[in-house]
Amino acid sequence: MKLSHFYKFLHIIILSFVFFTFKIFAVENIDERVKKLTLELRCMTCQNQSIYDSDAEFSNDIKKIVKNKLKAGESERDIKKFLVERYGEYILFRPLMNYNNIFLWSFPFILLIIGLFFVLIKSKENKV
């Protein structure tokens, strides 16, 4: 009889340990995702400092918004889209790839092609 109580008690302890362990990992997972996402966002009141690194009131509000949206199950892409709609694309350290800024993304490659073109012309002039 005493042995069966021991096993019940042990069973409850093991189940509670597993439950609290998973809960702690879930909280850490959300905190890590908040950190990862807020490192990619720019603080609007600080000078090019990330939301994660800033202690401004604006940054703390954005951290809360991001954490609440992650807890609600929204994806990082949806959260970024929401923040861009609300604050503009300046809030992102890495701008989005869209029609409005295609020149920004393609300009380095255009410069590379023009540079290679001039190198080829100069090398042909030296051979002649």
Image (cartoon, grey):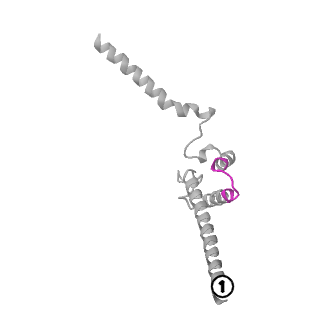
Any part of residue 97 in sight: yes
Taking depth in this image into account, of 8 and 125 the one nearest to the observer is: 8
Q: Which segment did they paint magenta? A: 68-78
* Res 56 seen here: no
- Which residue in the protein does label 1 denote? 4
Q: Find out whether residue 71 is within the magenta segment.
A: yes
Query: Residue 101: which quarter of the image?
Result: top right
Residue at the extreme right of the image, as rendered: 72
- Identify the residue at horizontal 34%, vertical 17% (top origin): 122
Q: Residues within 10 Å of mark 1 (few under 14, many from 20)?
A: few
Report if residue 37 lies within the magenta region: no
The disc labelled 1 sits on which kind of residue?
Answer: Ser
- Please indicate whether residue 12 sits to the left or right of residue 116 in the image: right
Give me the residue at 65% from left, 78% from top: 12
- Where does the image place residue 36, in percent across and percent down from the top left? 55, 54
Name the main secondary structure of what is drawn in magenta. Answer: helix
Which of the 4 image quadrants contains residue 3? bottom right
Residue found farthest to the left:
127
In the image, 37: left or right of 110? right
**Nearer to me, 71 or 117:** 71
Q: Nearer the viewer, residue 51 or 77?
A: 77
